Amino acid sequence: MRGLIKKCRLSGLGAVSLTRAKARKAINELIKKKIISNGDGISILKKALKEADSERKRIKDILIKEVN
């Protein structure tokens, strides 16, 4: 069971890392095309990363409750 939890956590971390990379790339494209300002891009990225971290923590808590 612990192996399954570890795999789930690693999968989640991989998804968050991929999401971060894609978010950065998308925001950089918007800045480059002058659709948003650099400051707005930074704010959007910070908000997206904060939400992703909250979701990761929520999923972790669910997994811990299911195992116990």
Image (cartoon, rainbow, N blue to C red):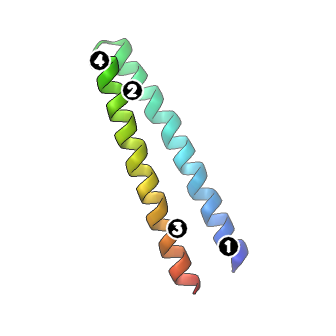
**Residue at horizontal 39 percent and vertical 37 percent from the top:** 46
The first of marks 2 and 1 along the sequence is 1
Inter-mark Cα distance, 2 to 1: 34 Å
Residue 25, image x, y percentages = 47, 27
Residue 27, image x, y percentages = 39, 26
Inter-mark Cα distance, 2 to 3: 28 Å
Q: Is residue 48 above or below residue 42?
A: below
- The label shown at residue 4 is 1
Residue beneath disc 4: 37
Q: Nearer the viewer, residue 65 or 11?
A: 65
Crowdedness near tag 1: few (<14), some (14–19) or many (≥20) residues, C-alpha within 10 Å: few
Label 4 with label 3: CB-CB less than 8 Å: no
Which marked residue is nearer to the observer: mark 2 or mark 3?
3
The first of marks 3 and 1 along the sequence is 1
Q: Secondary structure at mark 2?
A: helix
Residue beneath disc 2: 27
> What amino acid type should be assigned to the residue bearing mark 1?
Leu
Q: Secondary structure at mark 3?
A: helix
> What amino acid type should be assigned to the residue bearing mark 4?
Ser
Q: Secondary structure at mark 4?
A: loop
Residue occupying the far right of the picture: 3
> What amino acid type should be assigned to the residue bearing mark 2?
Ile
Which marked residue is nearer to the observer: mark 4 or mark 2?
4
> What amino acid type should be assigned to the residue bearing mark 3?
Lys
**Residue at horizontal 39 percent and vertical 34 percent from the top:** 45
The first of marks 4 and 2 along the sequence is 2
**Residue at horizontal 27 percent and vertical 20 percent from the top:** 36
Residue beneath disc 3: 60
Inter-mark Cα distance, 3 to 1: 13 Å
Q: Is residue 3 left or right of residue 57?
A: right
The first of marks 1 and 4 along the sequence is 1
Crowdedness near tag 3: few (<14), some (14–19) or many (≥20) residues, C-alpha within 10 Å: some
